[in-house]
Image (tube, rainbow, N blue to C red):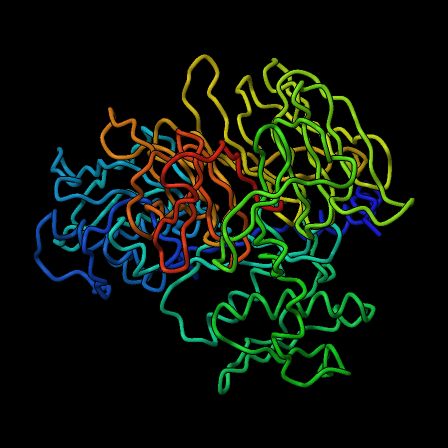
Amino acid sequence: MRRRLLVVLVSLLVPMAMLAGCAAVPTKGTIRSGDRAGQAPDLGGVGVEAKPPRPNVGDMAIVNGFLEAMSDSQAYDVARQYMTPEAAGAWKPEKQTVVYDQQPDSLTRKGDGIQLSAKMIATIDERGEWIPAPANAKADFFFKLKKVNDQLRVDSAPPGAYLGSNQVDLKLAPRDLYFLNQGRNMLVPDPVYLPQTLPSGQAATQLIQELLKGPTSRLGNGVVSAAPPGTEVQVSVPVDLGVATVALNDTAGSLRDPDRRLLAAQIVWTLNQLNLRAKITVGGAPLLPDDPEVLPFANFSQFDPQVPGTSMTRLYGIMNDQPQRIVGLDGSTNVEAQGVNNGPLAGKKAQSFAVTPRGDAGAIVTLDGHDVVYGLLDPTGKDDKEGTFKVEGETLPPSYDYDGNLWVLDRADTAHPRFRVHTGDTPGLTPIATDFKGDTPVALRMAPDGVRVLLVMQTAGTTQNYVETATVQTTNNGKQLVLGAFRPLRLPLTNISDAAWSKQGIIVIGAGGSPGNTKHQVWSVNADGSSLQLLPGSTPDFTPERVASNPNKDTLPVIQDDDGQIHWLSKDLAWVTMDSEKNHPVIVPTYPG
């Protein structure tokens, strides 16, 4: 039975608020390497081991050495050797890490010190969240120099640590902390950046400590943790032959069996990023006494945030104003569109179409824009849930989460867009309070967890679009749903037309490169806005306009071009066209979700 959204939210709000404590990251942390690095281009940086200052060196060498030392969160004591005692005492590098675009002319002499002037790429806060910097933000700091015992030293403490863009992958590694959606049936990743080169035991310890602090502000009370307030690791997390032993204090002993399994899922998934298996104890006894001592990862696969299952890879769409199933993308049959001929959607003219992640039901916005009609795609009997509700003004294509909740945003073309959810347990729609600050929503995509929201927005008074994420949370003691924690991705793209969730993070259609470039390309970016790159694969010979995708690892991204034709990225990273002769009717594609 589908969850009753508000009831669950009310019951979980108080413990979640108690868990959202503060932490510190850059003193121990890393940025996720490989799939999520900084947005700045790779400048060929080589990791340099922090070394103390050499005697009798000049001002530029002192500041360069200081920056090299502070770029390594394990070497802050070395970095302090470059400072006067007063500056070293005042310096708080754990406050934040400023990622900047390091260039040969970033440092210049000025008066009695050295001036750093560079483009700011992002900041990493004390919880390890990557926060993209606004387009014109600068990393500016004046390193005042003073002689101590006849040696030059830095006499001005910077606000946190500074990290050159060419050192990000070498120093920091992005990791996900895993929490639970409100239905407690799916894990939600919460990305943070932690140190790159820690031994496995230290990395596991830090990761579990951060997990037990609760979610970052990005997710807030939109997610829950099965760990009761006060749950801690009794000792460090030792690793032996690929097995991490997580010894929790007695606080976790109060958990009921179902909640113990949820906590185990959070820990097992979080440690799996380090290729570690988990052994979890509470007060010396197994957290799950009826399970193997070393918990198999497969025992928690049902919480997968990527939503495995063949239904997620089935493509749907609108053709000739009718909802369709698109078959044959896998090469097993000819590619063709098959009409939805049964149920409440059959015969209805539609402007957009959404399908549940389970592939059993769908919803359309009618062509006249007045109604949303929902129901099973293949009805089975008189108890089938179906219905219609009214919408007004511009209505964005709706979106489903894994629990079958239908999320709808209408009045998009007014000063007050309206965001609502149909939970399936009641005939009406539950309002979600939000404030887009005068900007206009252009596209809405829910993550399967029903917590994270992906939006394409148009800046007020312009024709420029941007991409941001947000989180469904609660206020008023859990009585009111609210869309908040807006995080613009700050992408160096123009002419953005669409975006969708993907297995790598997010796929964006937009133009990059020179300011005057308007040619659309297909980009991949992490959900926090880092590591923007062209989608791997051959260069398409068409102009992308819309994207259909979801987080399932087997889903093939599908692009609708500016002629209305569809193309998909095959598993060998080549673009396949449904109709190279362009004789086929226009299809607006969509995947479940």
Residue 590 showing in the rendered view = yes
Q: Quadrant of the C terminus?
A: top right
For residue 130, side relative to residue 357 (left or right): left
Residue under the point 72% across and 19% down: 370
Q: Nearer the viewer, residue 303 or 330?
A: 330
Compared across the picture, whether 519 is left or right of 368 comes to left
Q: How many marks?
A: 0
Up the image or down, 358 lies above or below 578; here it is: below
What residue is at 41 percent from the left and 75 percent from the top?
199
The one nearer the camera, 424 or 84, is 424
Q: Position of residue 230 (x, y in %)?
A: 70, 62
Q: Residue 204 location in percent, x, y?
A: 51, 71
In screen coordinates, is 202 left or right of 154? right
Q: Give the answer, above or below, for where 295 lies relative to 435.
A: below
As drawn, 421 above or below 574 = above
Residue at 43% x, 62% y is: 28
**Residue 90 appears anywhere in the view:** no
- Image position, residue 448 (x, y; %): 63, 49
User: Which image quarter: residue 122?
Assistant: top left
Task: Pick out the residue farthest to the right.
Answer: 382
Residue 71: image x %, image y %? 29, 55
Closest to the observer, 491 or 538: 538
Q: Nearer the viewer, residue 34 or 283?
A: 34
